[in-house]
Amino acid sequence: MSTLEHPDKAFDEMDSKDKVARLHLVNLPSLPTLLMEALQYTDDNQDLTAFADKISQDPPMVVRILRIANSPFYGMSREISSLRQAIVLLGLNRVRYMLLGVCFSNILPVRHKDFDYPLFWHHSMAVADCARQLAVYTGIGQDIAFTAGLLHDIGLLLIVLLFPDDFSRISNEPHPNKIETERRIMGFDHVEIGSKAAKHWNLPVAIQEAIEQHETPPTQESALSPGLLIYAANLLVIAAEQGDDSGLERQEAIACVLDKLAIPIDQATLWANTSLQFADQIVVII
């Protein structure tokens, strides 16, 4: 039995709503200790040394980070040969984002004929980096924005793992609105199950709420929040992925949320495109 399988056969016979209500009983994997500890460090000399020492205890992780640091995306003029050198040249926060991506992409491996795992993480990485850039502009914490962006669609992985047959039905439905299809077939959607997973992992409430809100358009009363950034980043990345085929409805939604964030469309589009380049480099390595 995998770490994400339910603990008893009675679970199979439950209604979908009862299943999601009992999600807290599912044995979701714990977040890696390395990840939880690394997120506590700040960008100063003392923490830089401690951070490098901590990651060095996991040699495969060091190899992955060095491969990412030496990728063309970062354009370093000389080869980065040590973890400490990577942290000095790239900055602790940037290396920490690499660590986030590697860790989260490895704790929920998925195999399903209807699920494109690399494409999923490519989109998630792009949204994470786009949200980080939006956060810099708006003054919201970059760590919260990046993590929330990385995990915004984590509920999709849980649906694939816990309800593979339902996922196949959802994937093969012609209806373009997957949220509505999920609710019709399962009685809940990936937003709901994703926010429950974030709560299970004791992630900050702001991240839980951002996952819960990432498909919800803002209203006039909506305040600036990580959830608003993730909603915007998700739309921007999807539009960049689809190019000219993004659709009028999505373009109008993007214009509305960027107006609320007071971000020029040209700047936001540039961030979305550079985020896709970031994802290109990360996903092929992790």
Image (cartoon, rainbow, N blue to C red):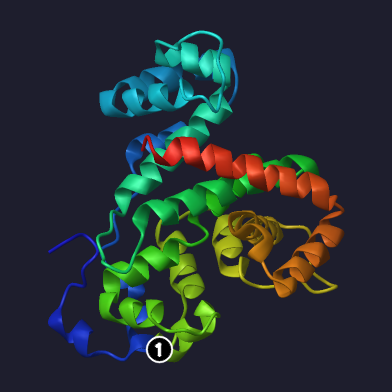
Quarter of the picture holding the N terminus: bottom left
Residue 126 visible in image: yes
Relative to 231, say whether 285 is above or below.
Answer: above
Comparing 182 with 18, the one in front is 182
Relative to 280, say whether 65 is above or below.
Answer: above
Relative to 210, say whether 187 is above or below.
Answer: below
Which residue is depicted at the point 28% across and 72% down?
Answer: 162
Lateral position of residue 238 relative to residue 36, left or right = right
From the image, tell me which residue sits under label 1: 185
Which residue is depicted at the point 70% across and 69% down?
Answer: 250
Residue 39 visible in image: no
Which residue is depicted at the point 24% across and 60% down?
Answer: 111
Identity of the residue furthest to the front in this view:
244
Which residue is depicted at the point 61% across and 65% down?
Answer: 214
Identity of the residue furthest to the top in this view:
78
Residue 22, x across and y down, in percent: 33, 78
